[in-house]
Amino acid sequence: MLLANRVNAGAARRVSGRTAAPMAVRAGRRALVCEARKVALLGAAGGIGQPLALLLKMNKFVTELALYDIANVVGVAADLSHCNTPVKVAGYTGPEELGACLKGADLIVIPAGVPRKPGMTRDDLFNTNAGIVKALVEAVAKYAPNAVLEIITNPVNSTVPIAAETLKAAGVYDPKRLIGVTSLDIVRANTFVSEAKGLDMKDVDVPVIGGHAGSTILPLLSQTTPPVTFTEAEKKAMTDKIANAGTVVVEAKAGKGSATLSMAYAAARMAESTLLGLNGEPNIYECAFVQSDVVADCPYFATKVLLGPNGVSKVMGLGELDAFEQAALAAMLPQLKGEIQKGIDFVKNPPKPAAPAS
Ligand SMILES: NC(=O)C1=CN([C@@H]2O[C@H](COP(=O)(O)OP(=O)(O)OC[C@H]3O[C@@H](n4cnc5c(N)ncnc54)[C@H](O)[C@@H]3O)[C@@H](O)[C@H]2O)C=CC1
Ligand SMILES: O=C([O-])CC(=O)C(=O)O
């Protein structure tokens, strides 16, 4: 599988050839050498984990898939292992098996944690998911410190700083190797703009910047490829539609979780782009929430990034924003900075445990 519609990748590249490690794959007219690649998926038995595992099992750039969860993962791994694609699948359950899952991984993807219910913000997940992410990243620091780590677990605006501080505390932080997954925002923006403008989905690319919660999700409609025009009212409506799309799914699922299938699709695209970068394929761009100095005093920010042999090779700038986007960027910053700081504080200044009652 090669997911179409990658930022700046031009037309979808068709890949032929059998998976073997290492293997030569034809990508357009270039021969691309693919390494053996182990991907570890933590939270693999969940709503995102299962379809994402299936998409990774179908991916020609993956050779080994290690599935970890605290529940139900043995069955998921047994089921998936019967698909006759060459990717080797193994299931791991419980903290005592986490090290074996992580060892040797090139890419680790974390969707472990609880999803929203109607009426909740992503920040409402902090109290449960912060500790889950911290504990998993401590294991990553110990068993796979050189892997690229992609965090899906919400609130992404806080869980990425939590992961960074956890890796720093272990002395193994490399900002190039830590990525907050915001690709669902780009997938949605591409879909909604294509539909609104009657364009072919595969041609449309809308960069989405900022973070991954409410108004911190800012599509740059003025930078859409191919260029499109909106009235001011249409621009506001489309921006709101993209920023609120997660909440629409949460409400439609009515207490049974949040986006899973579209998220799995988006994460598979991000994983594939990352593996292409690791394999030395040039010009692989995605939007992602990473350590950044693009916006003053905002240590993490989502923009386009160039993916390369060590993860993020380059954090791209904002480009030119129109007046609407400039105002939206200024308005989001207090929320985004606050959520980032909350994640940093969770690791650096943890709340003191309550004194036992005397
Ligand atoms: N970044 C993004 O764009 C998006 C993020 N999300 C977030 O992804 C997360 C997962 O969502 P779903 O898969 O729908 O939830 P889910 O509840 O269906 O699955 C979560 C899985 O994580 C597992 N888990 C919990 N604690 C764990 C631990 N300590 N170690 C390993 N596994 C553990 C659970 O057993 C479960 O299988 C949520 O926080 C959700 O908000 C969801 C959609 C989009
Ligand atoms: O809305 C949620 O809670 C899940 C999510 O991040 C999304 O769908 O964008």
Image (cartoon, rainbow, N blue to C red):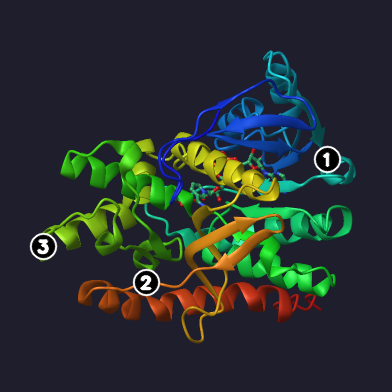
Q: Earlier in the sequence, mark 2 or mark 3?
A: 3
Q: Is residue 36 above or below residue 342?
A: above
Local SS, label 1: helix
Amino acid type, residue under disc 1 in the picture? Cys
Residue bearing the label numbered 3: 233
Q: Which residue is at the far bottom?
A: 297
Q: Is mark 2 within 8 Å of ligand 1?
A: no
Amino acid type shown at disc 3: Ala
User: In this orientation, which residue lies closer to the viewer: 185 or 336?
Assistant: 185
> Cβ–Cβ below 8 Å for labels 2 and 3?
no
* Residue marked by disc 1: 101
Location of the N terminus by quadrant is: top right
Q: Badge 2: how crowded within 10 Å, few (<14), some, or many (20+)?
A: few
Q: Residues within 10 Å of mark 3 (few under 14, many from 20)?
A: few
Mark 1 touches mark 2? (CB < 8 Å): no
**Snapshot quadrant of residue 255:** top left
User: Helix, strand or loop at disc 3?
Assistant: helix
Which residue is drawn at the image coordinates 63% and 70% (left, top)?
A: 161
Could you tell me which residue is drawn at 56 percent across and 39 percent down? 268
| Corner quadrant of residue 221 | bottom left
